[in-house]
């Protein structure tokens, strides 16, 4: 879905980009520069960024422009760079991660794993969805498994993935935001019974940052 310009510099659809704190999972609370790429064919019914699904409506940026923008907005700070979506692996991300590493940034990705892995990643957050299953070859590569809990059947579904991950993979359960009041107490009780899991909260929504 990505293209290249006349200088053979890859073009990627960028819905938005911003410097903030990572609000979820293992790196929660750390400074992070987010790049949200357009395009998604997973189709989560509870997705809070459905405007990201159509890659064609978002402006294209070259890899060079993306990296320069990050450096301009976070000069000399070198935060982690989180590539998210949409579903970022709908695009080949080899050139992007190579350029980010050359600029001394740590590369993190948040993905459903539904497309082949590209790019060289320092941290892979796998968040599989029922709507389109992750590719089996991605499971052992994940540093972090993050399951969004929407209803009680999701706990059993989460357990089927936990046993497929590598032993070092961190396991997180995260309440779907609109149902947080209902499912968070259930998650707490589940974790007490299954302490290999940890709770992930979307703290950026509580503290009102992007």
Image (tube, rainbow, N blue to C red):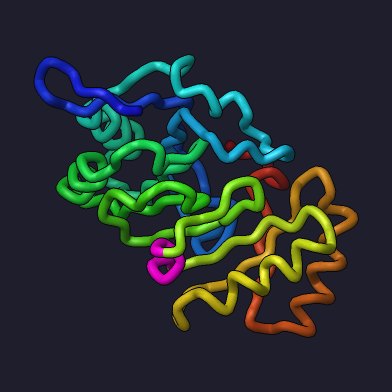
How far across and down, in percent of the image, does residue 208 sit? 67, 39
Residue at 66%, 52% in the rendered image: 130
Quarter of the image containing the C terminus?
top right
188 over 44 or under it: above or below: below
**What secondary structure do most residues of the magenta stretch adopt?**
helix
Span shown in magenta: 137-142
- The magenta stretch spans residue 39: no
Hey, which residue is sitting farthest right in the picture? 182
Q: What residue lies at 72% left-to-right and 47% top-to-bottom?
A: 206
Residue 61 % position (x, y): 30, 22
Image quadrant containing the N terminus:
top left
For the image, the number of numbered tags is: 0
Residue 204 horizontal/vertical position (percent): 63, 46
Instruction: Establish if 164 lies above or below 150.
Output: below
79 sits left or right of 26 in the view = left
The answer to which image quadrant residue 195 occupies is bottom right
Compared with residue 193, is residue 33 higher up or lower down, i.e. above or below? above
For the point 72% across and 83% down, which residue is it?
194
Left or right: 4 in relation to 32? left
Q: Residue at left 19%, top 47%?
A: 98
Along the horizontal axis of the image, is 157 left or right of 90?
right
| 74 vs 203: above or below | above
Q: Nearer the viewer, residue 25 or 56?
A: 56
């Amino acid at each position: 879905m990505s293209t290249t310009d006349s200088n053979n510099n890859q073009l990627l659809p960028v819905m938005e980009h911003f410097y903030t704190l990572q609000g979820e999972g293992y790196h929660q609370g750390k400074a992070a520069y987010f790049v949200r790429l357009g395009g998604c064919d997973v189709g989560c019914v509870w997705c809070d960024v459905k405007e990201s699904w159509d890659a064609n409506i978002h402006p294209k940026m070259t890899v060079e422009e993306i990296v320069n923008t990050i450096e301009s907005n976070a000069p000399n700070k070198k935060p982690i760079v989180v590539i998210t979506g949409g579903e970022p692996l709908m695009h080949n991300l080899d050139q992007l991660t190579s350029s980010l590493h050359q600029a001394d940034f740590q590369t993190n990705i948040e993905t459903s794993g539904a497309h082949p892995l590209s790019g060289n990643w320092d941290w892979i957050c796998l968040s599989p969805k029922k709507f389109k299953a992750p590719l089996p070859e991605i499971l052992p590569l994940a540093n972090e498994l993050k399951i969004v809990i929407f209803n009680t059947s999701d706990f059993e579904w989460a357990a089927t993935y936990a046993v497929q991950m590598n032993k070092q993979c961190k396991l997180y359960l995260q309440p779907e935001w609109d149902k947080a009041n209902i499912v968070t107490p259930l998650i707490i009780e589940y974790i007490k019974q299954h302490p290999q899991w940890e709770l992930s909260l979307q703290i950026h929504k509580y503290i009102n940052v992007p």
